Amino acid sequence: MTQIKNIGLFTSGGDAPGMNAAIRAVVRSAIYYNIGVTGIRRGFEGMINGDMFPMGIKSVSNIIQRGGTILKTARSEKFKTVAGRKAAYGQLVKNNIDALIAIGGDGTFRGAKEFNQEFDIPIIGLPGTIDNDLCGTDFTIGYDTAINTVINAVDKIRDTAESHNRLFIVEVMGRDSGLIALRTGIAAGAETIMIPEGNTDIQALFDRLENGRPDKTSKIIMLAENGKVGDAFEVGRLVKERFPNHDTRVSILGHIQRGGSPTCMDRVLASRTGVAAVEALIAGKKNVMVGLVHNQIAFTPFENATKHVTELDPDFLKIVEMLSI
Ligand code: ATP
């Protein structure tokens, strides 16, 4: 057992709905165990600048339902340098912080691992990203809210697509991962899904459109950003060129996918992993991400958690093909 007295808590990288629920869970469970919490604003950047404040029970009142992060978030180039990390450590010592809980994605955990190797401060990670691209958890905090936002938007797009007999190319977020496109493609009844991990090149898309049922009135193509063929406008241009008789439109959902009130699933995931993170520090764990695997709390070393998920369940893609006939 390690005697932790004061935990430094921060959110980092892209914001995700449910980060506030995770902040609340960490603060309240730490207080339950008589441990102090210092909030660090704007991730590693705020750590370097000493932008910190003590967090009490009331500091996290009425935030469980709010999107974004009350601690703010940032990407920090300075933290990628030895001098930046040294300055950050100096601030932690100055503020009597003896452990850290980081809520973020793979970049955040890479930074955390680097930091721990240099300064040996225990760090526990919580998976806060809409991308769901971390190993060691079935779902990340924010993913469920983001995919529900996407299907609500696509349902609306479907109304206009159906009324006008249109084909829509809908681009969703996911940087290097098609996990948002894959799941929402199934849930929104998409014709085809184009993701970095899949085989759908432009010819495969053309074949699918050519061989589809001619009496279909609306069609939705789900496209993950940063695809091999290009962005949604490029795919739209190629489809228009090949099928001039299709009334083709493009919709890029963009940042609405990051915002909004977290779903019940995300709030519960954030609450469970937040409590587990504090208990893990008390038990002497470090350099691990807390996730849920088969609905049980699981700990994964940072270096394994950040291994990019490159293989998606092939059954998911097959389901799209089977059900969109
Ligand atoms: P999301 O997946 O939502 O974008 P993320 O945590 O992956 O979240 P990044 O911007 O990739 O977001 O990383 C957050 C921050 O972590 C970076 O701005 C940088 O300060 C730090 N970081 C990333 N990689 C390293 C590294 N190799 N060494 C030190 N710090 C790093």
Image (spheres, rainbow, N blue to C red):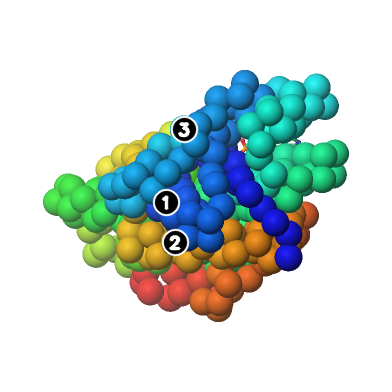
Of pointers 2 and 1, the one earlier in the residue sequence: 1
Location of mark 3 (residue): 72
Ligand 1 shows up in the quarter that is top right
Residue 54 as seen in the image, left or right of residue 228: left
Ligand 1 within 8 Å of the CB at mark 2:
no
Q: Position of residue 276 (x, y in %)?
A: 56, 65
Image quarter of the N terminus: bottom right
Marks 2 and 1 close (CB-CB < 8 Å):
yes
**x 82%, y 39%: residue:** 119
Task: Determine the secondary structure under disc 3.
Answer: loop
Mark 3 vs mark 1, CA separation in Å: 14 Å
Task: Relative to 97, say whether 154 is above or below.
Answer: below
Q: Which residue is mark 2?
A: 271
Q: Where is 158 relative to 53, above or below?
A: below
Residue at 85% in and 39% down: 118
Q: Residue furthest left?
A: 163
Looking at marks 2 and 3 on the same chain, the residue that comes earlier in the sequence is marked by 3
Q: Residue at point 34% right, 44% down?
A: 58
The disc label shown at residue 24, or none: 1
